[in-house]
Structure formats: structure tokens, C-alpha cells
Image: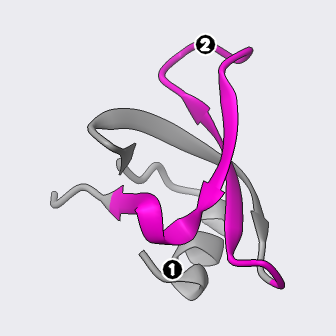
Amino acid sequence: MDIARAKQIYESQGTHAVHLEGDSVWIENVDEANGMATVTVGNNPLNTQTVSVDRLQEAKE
């Protein structure tokens, strides 16, 4: 995924299926300057990771 799409999903009112290495994630923040995103993995709010947006994949609807 590119940084522009990650930012678009983050700012969207809708729900978008995003995956990180097969796990479902929620984008919590996007750091445009560094190309990074903070995501919550699954439904566990304590399981957050900061990863390169290149590692994120939008699921095909």
C-alpha cells in the first residue's frame, strides 16, 4: 500500500479491510514523513505495531 492510500483509509468514515501479513488490522495513525503507520492487530487494543505502509495490504472486496 502507498502512503496516500493509507492516509485516505485512516481519514475515511467507512470501514476498509486492511491486512498485515495475513492478520486483520486497524490503522490508528499515519506518519506521512516517514512512511509508517501505527496499527492495531485484530481486536486486541494492546497489540499495536508501527510498520512501514509498504507492508499493509488492502483486502479486495
Q: Nearer the viewer, residue 45 or 54?
A: 54
Q: Relative to residue 51, is residue 36 depicted above or below?
A: below
Q: Residues within 10 Å of mark 1 (few under 14, many from 20)?
A: few
Kindly identify the residue that appears in the image at 16 percent across and 57 percent down: 61
Q: Secondary structure at mark 2?
A: loop
Q: Residue at x 51, y 55 (%)?
A: 14
Q: Position of residue 24 (x, y in %)?
A: 38, 34
Which residue, given by chain and number where applicable, does mark 2 sit on? 44
Residue where numbered disc 1 is placed: 5
> Which residue is more in the foreground, 12 or 35?
35
Residue found 55% across the figure and 68% down from its top:
53
Going by the numbered disc 2, the residue's amino acid type is Asn
Q: Residue at x 77, y 81 (%)?
A: 32
Image: 60 above or below 31: above
Distance between mark 2 and mark 1 Cα atoms: 24 Å
The reply to whether the magenta stretch includes residue 17 is: no
Residue 12 seen in the figure: yes
Dot 2 crowding, Cα within 10 Å, few <14, some 14–19, many 20+: few
Q: Nearer the viewer, residue 32 or 16?
A: 32
Question: Is residue 52 part of the magenta span, yes or no?
Answer: yes
x%, y% of residue 30?
75, 65
Instruction: State left or right for residue 11 relative to residue 25.
Output: right
At label 1, which amino acid type do we have?
Arg
Q: Is residue 9 visible?
A: no
Q: Which residues are magenta?
A: 33-57
